Amino acid sequence: MTLEDRTARLTILIDPRKKAVFERLCAEEDATPSQVVRRLIRAYIEERQGRPWRPEEVELPGARRAPKRR
């Protein structure tokens, strides 16, 4: 399983009207709100870091590295 296949929950609070409009717009492009939020987060990360997102470069908190083979 790749890092991109794993999930973690992110809970946000949003104005109910914005949520309704957001869900309608997502449905119009045949995307789930989760898909759109993931796309927005990835774009934000890439914009702030100034380079493409590479999940393999980021170590997850609490993850243990496998020992290097010699």
Image: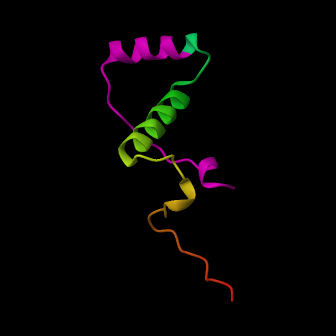
Say if residue 29 shows up in the picture: yes
Q: Is residue 63 above or below residue 56?
A: below
In the displayed structure, does residue 57 sit left or right of residue 66?
Answer: left
Per the rendered image, the range of residues in magenta is 1-26
Image quadrant in which the C terminus is located = bottom right
Name the residue nearer the viewer: 24 or 51: 51
Image quadrant in which the N terminus is located = bottom right
Say if residue 10 shows up in the picture: no
In the displayed structure, does residue 33 sit left or right of residue 68?
Answer: left
Residue 54 percent coordinates (x, y)? 54, 52
> Which residue is painted at 49% across and 12% down in the image?
25
In the displayed structure, does residue 12 sit left or right of residue 64?
Answer: left
Name the residue nearer the viewer: 36 or 54: 54
Name the image colouring.
Answer: rainbow
Residue 27 percent coordinates (x, y)? 56, 14
Residue 50 percent coordinates (x, y)? 40, 46
Q: Is residue 49 above or below residue 57?
A: above
**Residue 55 is one of the magenta-drawn residues:** no
Residue at the farthest bottom position: 70
- Count of marks placed on residues: 0
Residue 16 percent coordinates (x, y)? 34, 16
> Which residue is painted at 46% across and 68% down in the image?
62
Query: Can you tell which quarter of the image residue 3 is in?
Result: bottom right
